[in-house]
Amino acid sequence: MATALGASAVHASIFDTVSAMPANSWLQANDNLFSDVWTPKQYRLDPVEYWGNRQHSIIRAWSGFGWDSQRSSLIIYGGGHANYAGNDVYIWNAGTQLWGRASLPSQVQPDANGKIFTVDGPMNSPISAHTYDNDLYLKVSDRYITFGGAVWDSGPYVKPAGTGYTLTGPYLFDPAKADGNKVGGLSGSGVDPTIAGGQMWQNRDAYSGTAPPKSFVNGVSGYATENGKDVVYVQARAGGTRGELYRYTIHDPNDPTGDTWEKVGKNVSTKSPQGSGTYAPDLNLFMRTGTSTNPFMLWDLSHAGPTNGEIWLKPTDLTNGRFPVSNITKMGLDYDPLNQRFLIWGGGTDVYALAHDGSSLLSTGWTLSLLTDGGTAGPGVNDYGRGVLGKWQYASELGVFVGLKNPYDGEVWFYKPGDVAEALPLYAPDLAAYAADLPSYATSFRATEAVPEPSHLFLVGLPLVWWASRRFRVAT
């Protein structure tokens, strides 16, 4: 089942629309085009020197997005390297089903060494970048975060230091300050210097303490809230092409100097292919896509530390060979916390589930299944392009996965993964603690006095199911 949200649905609640979707169905949710809201020509960068007419590269060129669960919005910035130099930001909102521009691009210029920066400097706004799977939304700080990757015209985020440069970032963007008629940095920093600045960006400049990564090329990341703080698990390069796993913690949103980096996983194989990753807080696992030989790799974070090596997986394929393993490095992966499985998407109608049988070993017991039946209407054939990567995110407040494709039209697709009765968090010792993340149509499960319907009586057995699925933790 596929539906396009048109004019007749503008006044309908997006929650009602989503709750009406059948299980394992798709819905096209954008009511206008990405290209409809691109920066007007008079405010674009030089079209020849900085490829100022290539806004489509924001989606196309090795990019991801952050899903703002407070506003039910998709936030994206990108381009980078040899694709597009503009740092304009765009937002798609589920309530209106509309794309909008969140900021105009900063003007850029070379320094004395030819290195390109925004005119107001790296402490006020980032240069554009391939973002891979390095973008997320921080629930505590209420910010979009990007670690970048390959910037225009090369390298990671840096700032001048003496006669050279030093690493900098990550950058936070404040969606509350979004204004499509202002430049994202300081006033006067736009292509038209008379345009006001919204000061929407913050450079955390978090490169003190434990040695942080040196490059986020091909990086993958996942979010967690731990002890009331924003935490990002990110696999990034410590040097060369080796991608280690780090925990980045924002201890105080108002004090970047307190941010910390910790190495929680070692990349023993030294293989860090392009791909997508996520963190499963209930399982305490970081999962990512791998290679065509071993399609997935994970870190068991119950053993977090500098020597904690990765586990490579080759799951039992229940798709009769339909899973496109040769394109695994271009697919998107995110966690379905309500069904305790990982969903993989390649830009088409097919959605695959990676699940564990709860046995004692993490290296075995994994299966890969096809959730859609092949005849379901939806986004069409797989459209890998440069890679789905971070353009596949779980929207907890809606209970759907959000996929983004088509660099000109900006097609936003919702995928509803299953029945809510099957989707209760088996790991939750106290369901009330997870109420904020439950979809709106699951409100009946929040009240302890509610009488469960017959299909929901399985809740009585939740502790036993949880114990069975987690017993291997005791053994390890």
Image (cartoon, rainbow, N blue to C red):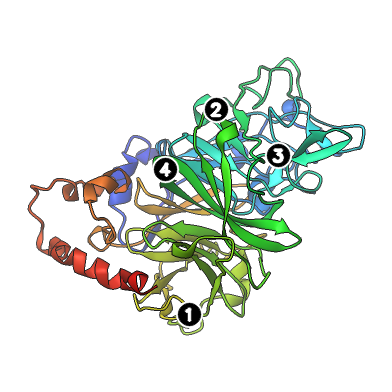
Give me the C-alpha separation between circle 1 and circle 2. 43 Å
Residue highlighted by disc 1: 315
Q: Amino acid at mark 4?
A: Gly
Q: Depth check: give the residue in front, 95 or 197.
A: 197
Residue at numbered disc 3: 168
Q: Earlier in the sequence, mark 3 or mark 2?
A: 3
- Which residue is at 35% across, 45% downward? 397
Residue 28 is at least partly visible in this image: yes
Mark 4 to mark 1 CA distance (whole Å): 40 Å
- Give the image location of residue 412, x and y in percent: 50, 49
Q: Please, what is the three-letter code of the amino acid marked with disc 2?
A: Ala
Q: Residue at x 73, y 26 (%)?
A: 43
Q: Secondary structure at mark 1?
A: loop
Label 1 to label 3: alpha-carbon separation = 38 Å
- Circle 4 sits on which residue? 6
**How many residues crowd mark 3 within 10 Å: few (<14), some (14–19), many (20+)?**
many
Helix, strand or loop under label 4: loop
Which disc, if any, is residue 219?
none
Which part of the image, by quadrant, shows the N terminus?
bottom left
Q: Nearer the viewer, mark 3 or mark 2?
A: 3
In the figure, is residue 178 to the left or right of 46? left
Q: Nearer the viewer, mark 1 or mark 2?
A: 1
In front: mark 4 or mark 1?
A: 1
State the residue at coordinates (55%, 29%).
Answer: 255
**Mark 3 and mark 2: span between their CA atoms?**
23 Å
| Amino acid type of the residue that numbered disc 1 sits on in the rendered structure | Pro
